[in-house]
Image (cartoon, rainbow, N blue to C red):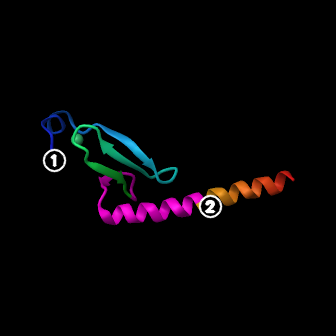
Amino acid sequence: MKSVYCSFFGHNYVVTKKVTLHIHEYECTKCHTQMTTGSNGDLIPLTAKYKEINSVLEGVYKKRRSKRLEGLLVFEH
Ligand SMILES: [Zn+2]
């Protein structure tokens, strides 16, 4: 699904999901190639394996964040 536009101008990625503060999922608006943030901060293809890793990370991240919120609420009381 490579578009002529992309091979000419490069992909036009938009964030489709914020997995954690630093890891996002991207999709090209032109050819719908999906990418994600790799461990070194580069964009890497979003394969089924990385989708799985991201969903695990997302779960951990949300759990941690809600725990932190609970901590704040306890602190305020
Ligand atoms: Zn593209």
Mark number, residue 1: 1
Magenta residues (range): 39-62
Q: Main secondary structure of the magenta part?
A: helix
Category of crowding for the residue at label 2, using alpha-carbon neighbours closer than 10 angstroms: few (below 14), some (14–19), many (at least 20): few
Q: Position of residue 15 (x, y in %)?
A: 40, 43
For mark 2, what is the residue?
64
Q: How many marks?
A: 2
Q: Position of residue 68 (x, y in %)?
A: 69, 57
Compared to residue 56, the image places residue 15 above or below, namely above
Q: Amino acid at mark 2?
A: Arg
* Magenta span includes 8: no
Secondary element at tag 2: helix
> What residue is drawn where x is 55% and y is 64%?
60
> What residue is drawn where x is 32% and y is 45%?
27
The mark that comes first in sequence, 1 or 2, is 1
Using residue 43 as the reference point, say whether residue 67 is left or right of it: right
Q: Nearer the viewer, mark 1 or mark 2?
A: 1
Q: Position of residue 39 (x, y in %)?
A: 40, 59
Q: CA distance from mark 1 to mark 2?
A: 38 Å
- Quarter of the figure with residue 48: bottom left
* Magenta span includes 49: yes
Using residue 39 as the reference point, say whether residue 35 is left or right of it: left
Q: Amino acid at mark 1?
A: Met
Q: Position of residue 22 (x, y in %)?
A: 48, 50
> What residue is drawn where x is 79% and y is 53%?
73
Farthest right residue in view: 77
> What residue is drawn where x is 81% and y is 57%?
74
